[in-house]
Amino acid sequence: MHLVFATSLVPCGAPETGYEIANAAVLDALERAGVRVSILGFVWPGKQALEPERTVVLDAVDVTTDGASTGQKLSWLATAMRKRLTFASAKLRSVTPDTVEAALGKLGPIDGIILNSVQFAGAFEKLLTRWPYLYIAHNVEHVSAHENAKAADSFFTRYLFQREARLLRDLEARLCERARFVFTFAEDDREKLGVAAPERSAALPLVTRAVPPSPLKTRKPLYDAALLGTWTWAPNMIGLRWFLDEVVPLLDGKLDIHIGGRAPEGMAKAYPAVTFDGRVPDAQEFVSAAKLVPLISRAGTGVQLKTIETFELGLPAVATTHSLRGIASIPHNCIRADEPKSFANALLEAASKPLPLVDGRDFHRDQIRRLDAELAKGLAALRDVQLGAAA
């Protein structure tokens, strides 16, 4: 079976973002299943495709909003309004549908398409849905957009997120309705997308690496707690604000807390009770230097890859229920807490009486086993379409 993995950003090197890590896990699983996969999409400016022999690059596009100029943002917005696209899909209209169709033609006969997330699918919906397809919903995007609208601090930003939410709700409904099978990364997302029936969808467990890390046998923690993430992304910021505003004050300065990753300018000055380290050279080394990892997600859909990475490393954690979505087997060194007081108390207790490390290889093996089993369900649905057409 020859499938095209249609994705906004093709693999360009070692995966770094959550989106890239999830893509790598799915592509590895497709390879284990014996599927021939071609990759179609865009690259970051200045980057090259990791696997050029099976990748068709449409254009180089920087899809980040934060670093874009005002002119670029207005251009994206104009395209979105004119073509009735979401803002995220409008960023990919640097090429025409004819260009995408010609690129697909160069790949030879294909049996189906894997629509990887909603952005690329939304930009070229009519074209990409001509083939039988599987749809991978990284998140329930209209829910995330609605949450972002509620958290917005200006009327214009709120309006833009509300517009995104309306368009995404309808787009996701269309993509799910016509898909041969839908994959999510969290069980709850199947129901939110209206495809909870087992013959319509499955949740894919994920891993953050092909090979599990070696167990952390001994270590000397340098600080009490470490958080790592891209804090400029709205759902992550909602969790971080909750932690800084409602949990940290209850700790009375008793814990040394370090926060790694890109954060909005001025945040370090606003919260002197914690240390902002910015971008860290080695994510694993950074979190492993802490006694425990607070997992603080409060918004968004899909799965929290930072949670998966923490469990693969066997690190102790205090986690909100929302941080644990999509995780079937929760290690015994993870404490669940949802209210600020209970979360703060759990942090203090875990730091004073350190929770043990566990062997994360067991968690990793279980995730791989279940990933392969769930992926096989969607591939079988696509094969049934082929057999029906042949008959």
Image: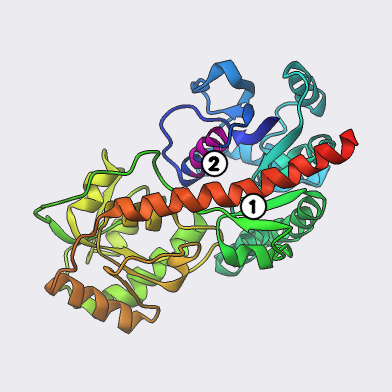
* Residue 23 in magenta stretch: yes
Identify residue for label 2.
26
* Residue 244 image point, x, y percent: 33, 69
Q: Residue at x 67, y 67 (%)?
A: 192
Report if the CB atoms under discs 2 and 1 are less than 8 Å apart.
yes
Q: x and y percent of residue 59 in the render?
A: 64, 23
Residue at left 32%, top 44%? 212
Query: Magenta includes 80?
Result: no
Relative to residue 160, is residue 134 depicted above or below? above
- x, y percentage for residue 26? 54, 41
Dot label at residue 183: 1
Q: Main secondary structure of the magenta part?
A: helix
| Residue 41 falls left or right of residue 218 | right
Q: Secondary structure at mark 1?
A: strand
Asked whether the viewer can see residue 343, the reply is yes
User: Which segment did they paint magenta?
Assistant: 22-32
